[in-house]
Amino acid sequence: MNANAPIQKTQAESDLLSRFETTRAELPGSVTVTALREAALGQIRDRGLPHRRVEEYKYSDLRAFMKSAAPLAAATDLAATKAVVESAETFGDLDRYRVVVANGVFQPELSDVDQLLAEGVSVFSFADTLDDADASQMLKTPKTGPEDGVVALNTAFVRGGVVIAVKSGVEVSKPIELVQVATSAGAQAVRNAVTLGEGAKLHLLETFVGDTGAGELNTVFDYNVSDKASLAATRLMTGKTEAARLFTSIATLGAEAEFKSLGFIAGPRFTRNQQFVNFAGENSEANIYGVSMAGGEDLADQTLIVDHAVPHCNSREFFKTVLDGRAKGVYQGRINVAPHAQKTDGEMMTQALLLSEDAEMANKPELEIFADDVICAHGATSGQIDEDLLFYLRARGIPEDEAKTLLVLAFLSEAIEEYDEEDVTEGLETRVRDWLASH
Amino acid sequence: MLEIKNLHARIAEDETEILRGIDLKVNAGEVHAIMGPNGSGKSTLSYILAGKDDYEVTEGEILFNGENLLDMEPDERAAAGLFLAFQYPLEIPGVATMEFLKTAMNAQRKARGEEALSIPEFMKRVKEQAADLNVSMDMLKRPLNVGFSGGEKKRSEILQMSLLEPKLCVLDETDSGLDIDALRIVSEGVNKLRSPERAMIVITHYQRLLDHIVPDVVHVLSKGRIVKTGGKELALELEKNGYADYIDAAA
Ligand SMILES: Nc1ncnc2c1ncn2[C@@H]1O[C@H](COP(=O)(O)OP(=O)(O)OP(=O)(O)O)[C@@H](O)[C@H]1O
Ligand SMILES: [Mg+2]
């Protein structure tokens, strides 16, 4: 279709346009930023929200899903934020630093700013960076593919977020949990930038707590992993909610860098987790994992584009999906290998376990290879619980539900174990059990 | 303990009749051996006892300690004290052996209204039994049966049986794939469980196993029927002469 053809606006699209008019004055940023916001909104105005005839959103029609668009959540106060953060059960007792963003605004009072600074990590407001003359640097769009509608929506409305910058050579002694909080209903557009200096190391936990009501949550994470640095990012996309949950990662990796991520989806009605990974330096490695659990009418979409722009880089993608009810799972993974990106090693696997007849999985692994000396492979499977294994467990006295839980956990654990971040293994497995118990 | 009356069963999918009228009574304290040619229905009988739903009982009944076994779910049968050592134990990737043992033991205890085992008590029991059966700690650390050799899988089955302390043990060709030493170790494990309160059904092709686990009664199963029942000397006779006499008699 012609992407520029005028379209009939949906209610949500009209709402977004008027949301912009009413909130633009209070959104942060220099003139440059305002221009970027206007251009991004123009994209939404002209092309609409991403829909099924846009290749990347074929299986996840955001335009059809969003019936309306709620106003942006108002700024919050400290006490309300504190209450939500303290009641949150994200990673239990795990020893970690905390950085809090509430209704899109960085909360230094609730964040471990001083301790982190002492370790060599500076943490500051993303909104403040938008006042700079070169602020356009901060509102990155993915290098790969056409302008993404979800990122445009974020650019138009972004209120703020946090910047976490780890100094060269610093290996942060414990994980940092970036908690995004909703203290009141309303949409949120958040940007976080995470920068690792040369040889730095960090495990970032990304969590979201609270209820946005009918408002969509749109968060973009911009990761910059310098040479020899290593970043692991564990993203929890959990909690029952009827509104869209939209997550984007834009990762740029230097030379001899390591990037790992695990995106865990369980609960929301509509989740899209999209990741754009760009190899900018040689001899680097990216290992991307996904665990999705969807039941009822849920949609869980894991989309990923890995761009091998330089030679000698390895990437591994391993995604697991469990579906029940009438849920839909989506895996779209593309590995691009540029003509000169020789000696690339790319391996992509997506596996789905369907617990009901009506659940549906769309697997779309793709390889686009323009170099000749590469090793790339992909595979996709969908299946049911193995009845013989189930019988074996039951014959040992394990009741059916518990036996199924064991088998589902075994299925998903393969990805969790391979991700190999011991700090979160148990927490993630507990979440799998909780999800199964609530179904 | 177990009473099978005129059991007829077929494969659920294609309705092929496999068992054609089995009568078998096993009392507490007894060991019964079942022998018979390949394909005669021995494993089918064991699966029906354990509750596999690939098979459909068309006639007859099974009483287990007075209860109607066919009305019970597989896990209820296990909790009631029935254990099947599989002819082909399954590999379950991603399920840790220890986790599995603990889950199974505690599920059965819960079903019987008993307290869950404490971790130290559980560990103590596993270590004791594993040592007796020559099951290494390395094996216990692996996912259930994954990458185990044929003989290791059989020892793993007997380890499970020893820990679960069933009332009725059904052993389906537990001797196949075992080397001479393993056969002795496994037999000792089984003999240790022999008691006046416990009964066993031992399915085998070889007299050799019955030298170790001496049966009270030997049955010959052919084409879905028990065609001959005798004492332990019947096994010796079969070893010498084969099944020809009985198969013909059944035809
Ligand atoms: N699920 C099934 N589907 C199809 N055929 C089956 C199934 N189960 C058993 N059979 C058939 O039923 C017959 C009896 O099989 P069974 O496994 O009970 O024999 P067996 O006496 O245990 O033999 P063996 O000594 O070789 O172990 C065989 O012909 C077998 O092919
Ligand atoms: Mg058999």
Image (spheres, coloured by chain):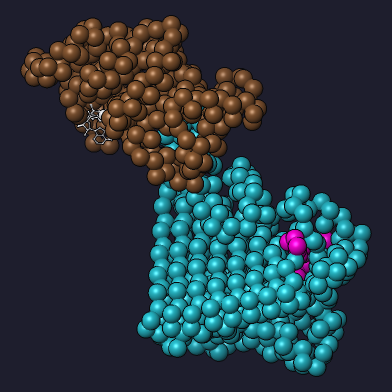
Chain colours: A cyan, B brown
Point 36% across, 8% down: residue: B30
Rendering quadrant holding ligand 2: top left
For the question of whether residue A11 can be seen, the reply is no
Q: Say which quadrant the C terminus of chain A sits in.
A: top right
Point 57% across, 23% down: residue: B109
Q: In the image shown, does A233 or A404 lie closer to the viewer?
A: A233
Residue A114: horizontal and vertical position, in percent? 88, 68
> With respect to residue A362, does A26 lie above or below?
below
Q: Is residue B94 left or right of residue B147?
A: right
Residue range corresponding to the magenta coloring: A173-188
Residue A355: horizontal and vertical position, in percent? 48, 48
Residue B13: horizontal and vertical position, in percent? 27, 37
Q: Is residue A389 left or right of residue B16?
A: right
Residue A181 counted in the magenta span: yes
> With respect to residue A198, does A385 lie above or below?
above
> With respect to residue A238, does B184 lie above or below?
above
